[in-house]
Structure formats: structure tokens, C-alpha cells
Image (tube, helix red, strand yellow):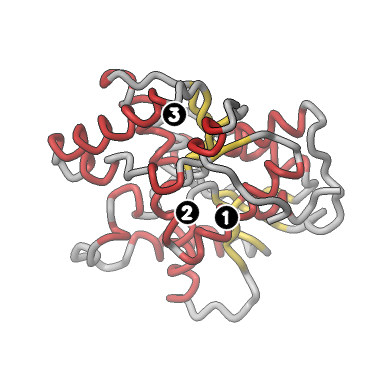
């Protein structure tokens, strides 16, 4: 990183408030592949001179996995602990690179007393580009064939389809849409917890089927906006013995490689 990243506690000790809170999420904190996405987004924030903070060790799981698994008690316990921390710092605006955290913080925390402006990182990055706070250098991915996989908790759950595509348009890529995209996009399986357990009986794993849909377009890159989708699609590529240098990348990584 260009500069050290401060926590909310450090900002408070200085008597200051950051512009945004970057909610890192469990995957972005602990998964080695997702950490690269975290670093790319943090690097973009620093290049845009955004004053931001993280919670550090004060950030707990949003409770999303517990809620999806039907454990409402555990979800509320985890959520209320986070809300107590967030409200103690008088947080107003949260940005996260995880659609699961985005959906939970945005739609499920308000009924428990946690009301904030919550943005997915693709929405925030697009606003930075439109405001001229960061500028695309171009060239690296210009004309490259890229397809975007819609994360379920970003698309179907929150109707965010265009921000990721507008980001790709600014990179001047050749955007190829899969047959099932946007409202009709096929889940990679992570939204159904397939990342955390053995696949259910069937003729094909769902992440493999989704990867095959992407490969039909012969893309250079499969782009995502979710660390869990990234893992599922990367595993899908490995199952196909991919030797053709096709990569799965987060939009933050693509943009960070293209800044002037």
C-alpha cells in the first residue's frame, strides 16, 4: 500500500472522521485470493485521495451466513454487535467489495437499528471516475474480450447491474454477455452456500456449468464483483483444466491496473 490504513479507533483518537468506512468482510480479510481484491480497492481509494478507515479487529461477520442458514438468533447477535460498534463511531457511509455484506448491511441492519448509506465498491468506483477523482489510463485491457458474471446479492437482490458494466466500458473492453445474465443470470453456487459444503447430488456442479457458459464466449477474462463468485469461477476453470490463460478478476483489480 502507498500509505498505512487507519482504523476508526485511530481516527477517533485524532478527533477526526473519515469520508467512508471500508467494510472489508470475512473473505477480504482472511482468504488469500480475496485479500488481493481488498488491497486493490484500498489502493484505488488512496490514489483517489479518499480519507477512509477500516474497523480492523472491531469488524465482525455481518451474520449473513447464519441468516441464510436459518439461524436468526446467531444473525441478530452478530448484527447487533456490529451495529453497536458502527453507531459508536457515528458511521454514515459504508463501502464494501462483498455483495453479501452489502446486502446485509444495506437491507437487514436498518430493522435492528443500524441505518447507513451502503454502496458496493463498483458503485463507489464509478462515482470516483465520473467525478474525475481517478482517471483511466487505458490500453491494458482495451479491446480484450471480457464477460461479467452478475453476483446474486448484487444483481437480483439489489438490482445493481449497470455500475459494473459502466466500469468495464470505461476500460474500453469488448464486453461479452453470457446467455444468462443480469436478471436471468445463473448463480455460481456461492449464493446458495455451495462454497462452504460438498455439492448436492446431480450431473454437474453449478459453478462448472456457469464457467462453461462463460467459456462459450472465449473470453480473455471473466470479471466478477464478489470474492465468493471469484472463488467459485476460479474453481470452475480449474475443473476444466484451463490452460488458455483465462483469468478471473475482480473489477477493482482491473481498474487498479488501468489508472493513470
Percent position (x, y) of residue 7? Answer: 52, 41
Q: Residue at x 34, y 54 (%)?
A: 189
**67 vs 259: above or below:** above
* 191 sits left or right of 80 in the view: right
In whole angstroms, how far apart are the C-alphas of marks 2 and 3? 21 Å
- Pointer 1 and pointer 2: residues touching (CB < 8 Å)? yes
Circle 3 is placed at which residue position? 158
Q: Secondary structure at mark 2?
A: helix
* 58 sits left or right of 213 in the view: left
- Pointer 2 and pointer 3: residues touching (CB < 8 Å)? no
* 119 sits left or right of 199 in the view: right
Give the label on residue 159, or none: none
Circle 2 is placed at which residue position? 28
How many marks overall? 3
First in sequence: mark 1 or mark 2? 2
The 10 Å Cα crowd at callout 1, few under 14, some 14 to 19, many 20 or more, is many
Q: Residue at x 55, y 77 (%)?
A: 242
First in sequence: mark 3 or mark 1? 1
Percent position (x, y) of residue 121? Answer: 58, 38
Q: Nearer the viewer, mark 2 or mark 3?
A: 2
**243 vs 116: above or below:** below
The 10 Å Cα crowd at callout 3, few under 14, some 14 to 19, many 20 or more, is some
Q: Nearer the viewer, residue 183 or 24?
A: 24
In whole angstroms, how far apart are the C-alphas of marks 3 and 1? 21 Å
- Pointer 3 and pointer 1: residues touching (CB < 8 Å)? no
Among the 4 quarters of the image, the one containing residue 248: bottom right
Circle 1 is placed at which residue position? 37
Q: Secondary structure at mark 3?
A: loop
Percent position (x, y) of residue 243? Answer: 59, 81
Percent position (x, y) of residue 155? Answer: 46, 35
First in sequence: mark 2 or mark 3? 2
Q: Secondary structure at mark 1?
A: helix
Amino acid at each position: 500500500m502507498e500509505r498505512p490504513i487507519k482504523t476508526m479507533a485511530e481516527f477517533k483518537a485524532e478527533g477526526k472522521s473519515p469520508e467512508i468506512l471500508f467494510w472489508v468482510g470475512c473473505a477480504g480479510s482472511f482468504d488469500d485470493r480475496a485479500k488481493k481484491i481488498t488491497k486493490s480497492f484500498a489502493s484505488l481509494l488512496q490514489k483517489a485521495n479518499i480519507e477512509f478507515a477500516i474497523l480492523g479487529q472491531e469488524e465482525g461477520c455481518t451474520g449473513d451466513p447464519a441468516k441464510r442458514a436459518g439461524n436468526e438468533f446467531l444473525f441478530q447477535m452478530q448484527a447487533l454487535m456490529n451495529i453497536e460498534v458502527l453507531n459508536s463511531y457515528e458511521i454514515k457511509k459504508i463501502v464494501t467489495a462483498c455483495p453479501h455484506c452489502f446486502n446485509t448491511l444495506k437491507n437487514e441492519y436498518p430493522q435492528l437499528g443500524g441505518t447507513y448509506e451502503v454502496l458496493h465498491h463498483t458503485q463507489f468506483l464509478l462515482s470516483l471516475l465520473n467525478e474525475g477523482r481517478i482517471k483511466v489510463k487505458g490500453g491494458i485491457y482495451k479491446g480484450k474480450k471480457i464477460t461479467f458474471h452478475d453476483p446474486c446479492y448484487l444483481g437480483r437482490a439489489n438490482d445493481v447491474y449497470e455500475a459494473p458494466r459502466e466500469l468495464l466500458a470505461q476500460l474500453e473492453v469488448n464486453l461479452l454477455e453470457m446467455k444468462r445474465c443480469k436478471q436471468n443470470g445463473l448463480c455460481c453456487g456461492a449464493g446458495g452456500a455451495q462454497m462452504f459444503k460438498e455439492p448436492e447430488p446431480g450431473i454437474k456442479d453449478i459453478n462448472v456449468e456457469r464457467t462453461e457458459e462463460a467459456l462459450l464466449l472465449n473470453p480473455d477474462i471473466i470479471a466478477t464483483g464478489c470474492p465468493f463468485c471469484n472463488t467459485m469461477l476460479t474453481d470452475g476453470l480449474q475443473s476444466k483444466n484451463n490452460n488458455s490463460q483465462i483469468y478471473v478478476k475482480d473489477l477493482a483489480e482491473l481498474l487498479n491496473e488501468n489508472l493513470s
